């Protein structure tokens, strides 16, 4: 939590900064720790209820910790018609979790995104920040191993 | 450095152009989203290394440019060598040394890396000669692939900020509004509302302050025009926005970028910093006395935030729920103040309109849809990528002449335009000119410009289900018809896909759609049933086959197909066994394998690995 003051310092101390602050917290911790939410509410003078409604409304925020490797499968239209659903399903089976969940050992999180704007390479899978294009349904094992 | 007068800008441009002319050759590496995904960053790295090692006489490292998306993403990573426009495709790091030796040091082309014309197998050397590029006309995408996306100087060389200088010193705000009105520019974000009218309403609004906002949310799945512009030519958006701000009397503005586009956020922030240093943003812009500051606001991954009133709430740090539009947001927008909100591509067109005149722009395209439109042409088409054509170009020209036809020569089935608000058009609509009104009349929509081509292996019922699932997920839930109606509609389509649907369901769904469209508050609900309605209209037969025959002609809907191994073809190579993540396949070496239908999820992985074509879908 020692990072919080620095994050707060990046934005004006007004309710309007709420989303930007939460985004930076999410980036720092990979999720929104409850303590950080409380401090944010206090610092920006917004009610806790609003902090919660904002953090649950936007897909970018997560109230649970994420795994070391966040695997995001694009489910945009192009990726969908090129077989992204099957890739997702394979990942879910291999890891025994559903999309949006994290493995109990905190190694993997699987998420769905709706188009990352690289449709010409559909289907696209992003592991942490790295993009993989034209992913075959048979490549999931390799993706889990690290490319 | 700061530019304080238009004359100073002209002088600076002359100097920059002269410096640019000294480069005998330039290397342009596409660093757009697609090429980066395919390893463009490593090409740049390698080029730096090799160029440093070899020190070619007369070649300065400034002549190595990292550009935005060049459009033909599927051929990437790509390297273009100017001035000839030599076009190398699928470049690998190990090709770099050879490119430097042959094409930079000498004047030779590496045949192997050139583009193969699939229609006749000939190699094409210059990109201008490739049919994919030859048929396009680029206004909004004018600088993509042509300039280094990280450098404001590059934008100035190609005439950047010239229009701003003209607007601020030679025109009055009302002249600018008039010019934009003359141009006929309609919003590129989907609804096609006349930009001139929006600007003029805002300019006249009495309440102050006024705001200018750019919608860079680009929520339509399958579309990436705005991403490419924000990343590859951010200054064109900034310039358009400053001109808009001057025209409507705004001094503050925001660019709202979806969170899935981190590079766009970075490049825009850098561009804002550069433009502020040069005096094109901030206080006393170009010495004119006009002030305008611009901030980037990041979205939170909610599709509905692309809707204008939701977007403005989101910028204000709130939950992005749309509001009813008794009063338009141009009068009561951000913080309830008069606000001009336009799309990225709309703004990118503005400098050209001011520079060349509204009449010039209105002369392109059709009478009621002027100018050009950028599309992301994707799906089952041979040449996928980012394109821009005059309004009124037909779907057939786009898909067959620019797109090169359907992948693997399969039959064309439909083209989806307009994203979740649009629809699927069948073969007999291919000769329709693409413009706002024609597509709407054909029960689709131009939307923001995603164009997804489908072949016979795409199931349109599944596509309708896909969009409905997307909208159910993304509905903000504020109004019942949208929240509940789309959910029910999705359930009914699911039922059909599962082979449980009836013809009465179709009637029910049509009625339900009417209610959803009539009673929803914002565009998400109002247009939500469109993908269903258009597929039903044009592909009713396909729905009926699902319902009556319990079959999916495209072999997509899971409950209606099965995977089987053809005994005679299977040689027991065992490749499919580990490919199945669901342990559905059993078999011994050199023995025919079997699929346990209870375990099989129909993922198709086995079919991909089987080299003997032994797996069939029934
Ligand atoms: C649910 C919904 C999502 C939208 N998403 C976008 C979007 O991602 N980008 C965009 O420019 N416009 C989007 N729009 C349209 C905007 O509300 C608005 O009309 C547009 O940005 C105005 O700019 P323009 O006139 O330049 O097109 C969306 C509308 C709705 C109803
Ligand atoms: S139509 Fe849907 S998305 Fe729009 S306000 Fe209503 S519930 Fe929200
Ligand atoms: S279709 Fe998928 S689940 Fe079924 S047998 Fe093949 S690999 Fe296994
Ligand atoms: S991959 Fe094909 S040939 Fe090999 S065992 Fe499987 S079905 Fe038989
Ligand atoms: S649909 Fe997957 S990247 Fe666009
Ligand atoms: S990203 Fe390189 S051509 Fe589109």
Image (cartoon, coloured by chain):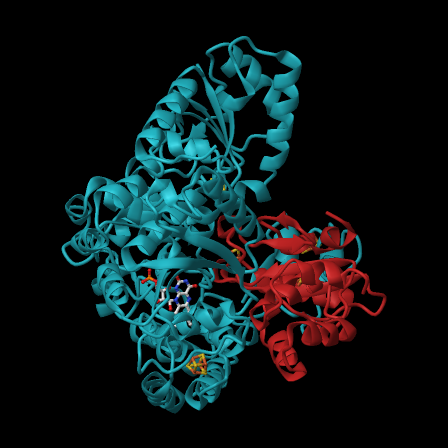
Chain colours: A red, B cyan
User: Ligand 3 sits in which quadrant?
Assistant: bottom right
Image quarter where the C terminus of chain B lies is bottom right
Q: Residue at x 43, y 19 (%)?
A: B19
Q: Position of residue B224 (x, y in %)?
A: 45, 53
Q: Is residue B12 left or right of residue A113?
A: left
Q: Is residue B555 left or right of residue B564?
A: left
Q: Position of residue B423 (x, y in %)?
A: 35, 68
Q: Is residue B323 left or right of residue B402?
A: right
Query: Above or below — where is B296 with respect to B81?
Result: below
Q: Is residue B583 visible?
A: no
Q: Is residue B589 left or right of residue A79?
A: right
Query: Above or below — where is B433 with respect to B102?
Result: below
Q: Residue at x 64, y 19 (%)?
A: B50
Query: As rendered, which of B75 and B39 lies closer to the eye?
Result: B39
Q: Is residue B57 visible?
A: yes
Query: As rendered, which of A93 and A30 lies closer to the eye?
Result: A30
């Amino acid at each position: 939590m020692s990072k919080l003051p620095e994050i707060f310092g990046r934005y004006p101390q007004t309710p309007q900064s709420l989303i930007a602050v939460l985004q930076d917290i999410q980036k720092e911790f990979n999720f929104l720790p409850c303590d950080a939410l409380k401090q944010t509410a206090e610092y920006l003078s917004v009610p806790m209820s609003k902090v919660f409604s904002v953090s649950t409304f936007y897909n970018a925020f997560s109230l649970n910790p994420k795994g070391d490797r966040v695997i995001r499968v694009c489910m945009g239209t192009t990726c969908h018609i090129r077989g992204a659903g099957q890739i997702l399903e394979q990942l879910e089976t291999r890891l025994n979790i559903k999309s949006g969940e994290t493995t109990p050992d905190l190694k993997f999180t699987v998420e769905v995104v709706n188009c990352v704007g690289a449709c010409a390479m559909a289907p696209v899978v992003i592991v942490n920040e790295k993009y993989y294009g034209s992913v075959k349904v048979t490549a999931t094992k390799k993706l889990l191993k690290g490319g | 450095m700061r530019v304080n007068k238009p004359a100073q800008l002209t002088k600076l441009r002359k100097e920059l152009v002269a410096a640019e002319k000294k480069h005998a050759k330039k290397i342009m590496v596409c660093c757009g989203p697609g090429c980066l995904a395919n390893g463009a960053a490593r090409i740049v790295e390698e080029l730096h290394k090799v160029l440093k090692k070899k020190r070619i006489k007369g070649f300065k490292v400034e002549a190595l440019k990292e550009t935005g998306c060049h459009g033909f993403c599927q051929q990437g990573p790509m390297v273009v060598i100017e001035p000839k426009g030599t076009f190398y495709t699928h470049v690998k790091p190990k090709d770099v040394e050879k490119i430097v030796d042959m094409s930079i040091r000498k004047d030779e082309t590496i045949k192997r890396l050139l583009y193969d014309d699939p229609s006749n197998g000939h190699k094409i050397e210059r990109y201008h000669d490739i049919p994919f590029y030859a048929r396009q006309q680029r206004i909004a995408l004018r600088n993509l692939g042509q300039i280094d996306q990280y450098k404001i100087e590059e934008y100035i060389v190609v005439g950047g900020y010239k229009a701003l200088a003209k607007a601020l010193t030679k025109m009055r705000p009302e002249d600018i509004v008039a010019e934009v009105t003359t141009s006929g520019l309609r919003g590129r974000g989907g609804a096609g509302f006349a930009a001139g009218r929006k600007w003029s309403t805002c300019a006249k609004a009495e309440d102050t302050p006024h705001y200018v906002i750019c919608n860079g949310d680009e929520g339509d799945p399958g579309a990436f025009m705005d991403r490419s512009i924000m990343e590859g030519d951010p200054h064109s958006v900034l310039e358009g926005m400053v001109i808009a701000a001057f025209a409507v009397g705004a001094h503050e503005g925001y660019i709202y970028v979806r969170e899935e586009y981190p590079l766009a956020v970075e490049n825009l922030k850098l561009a804002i910093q550069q433009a502020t240093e040069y005096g094109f943003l901030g206080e006393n812009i170009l010495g004119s006395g006009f002030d305008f500051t611009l901030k980037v606001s990041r979205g939170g991954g909610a599709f509905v935030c692309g809707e204008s009133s939701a977007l403005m709430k989101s910028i204000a740090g709130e939950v992005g729920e749309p509001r009813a539009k008794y009063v338009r947001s141009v009068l009561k927008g951000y913080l309830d103040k008069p606000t001009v909100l336009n799309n990225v591509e709309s703004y990118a067109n503005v400098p050209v309109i001011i520079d060349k005149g509204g009449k010039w722009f209105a002369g392109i395209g059709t009478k009621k849809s002027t100018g050009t439109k950028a599309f992301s042409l994707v799906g089952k088409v041979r040449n996928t990528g980012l394109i821009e054509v005059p309004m009124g170009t037909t779907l057939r020209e786009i898909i067959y002449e620019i797109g090169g036809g359907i992948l693997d020569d399969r039959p064309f089935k439909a083209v989806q335009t307009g994203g979740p608000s649009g629809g699927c058009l069948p073969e007999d609509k291919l000769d329709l000119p693409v413009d706002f009104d024609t597509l709407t009349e054909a029960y689709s929509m131009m939307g923001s410009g995603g164009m997804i081509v489908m072949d016979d292996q795409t199931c349109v019922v599944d596509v309708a289900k896909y969009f409905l699932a997307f909208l159910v997920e993304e509905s903000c839930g504020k109004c019942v018809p949208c929240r509940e109606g789309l959910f029910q509609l999705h359930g009914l389509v699911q039922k059909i896909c599962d082979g449980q649907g009836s013809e009465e369901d179709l009637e029910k769904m049509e009625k339900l759609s009417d209610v959803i469209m009539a009673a929803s508050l914002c565009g998400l609900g109002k247009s939500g049933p469109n993908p269903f309605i258009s597929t039903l209209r044009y592909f009713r037969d396909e729905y009926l086959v699902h319902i009556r025959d319990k079959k999916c002609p495209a072999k997509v809907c899971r409950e209606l197909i099965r995977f089987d191994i053809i005994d005679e073809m299977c040689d027991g190579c065992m490749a499919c066994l580990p490919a199945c993540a669901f342990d559905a396949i059993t078999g011994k070496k050199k023995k025919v394998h079997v699929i346990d239908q209870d375990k099989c999820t129909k993922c198709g992985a086995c079919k991909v690995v089987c080299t003997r074509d032994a797996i069939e879908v029934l």
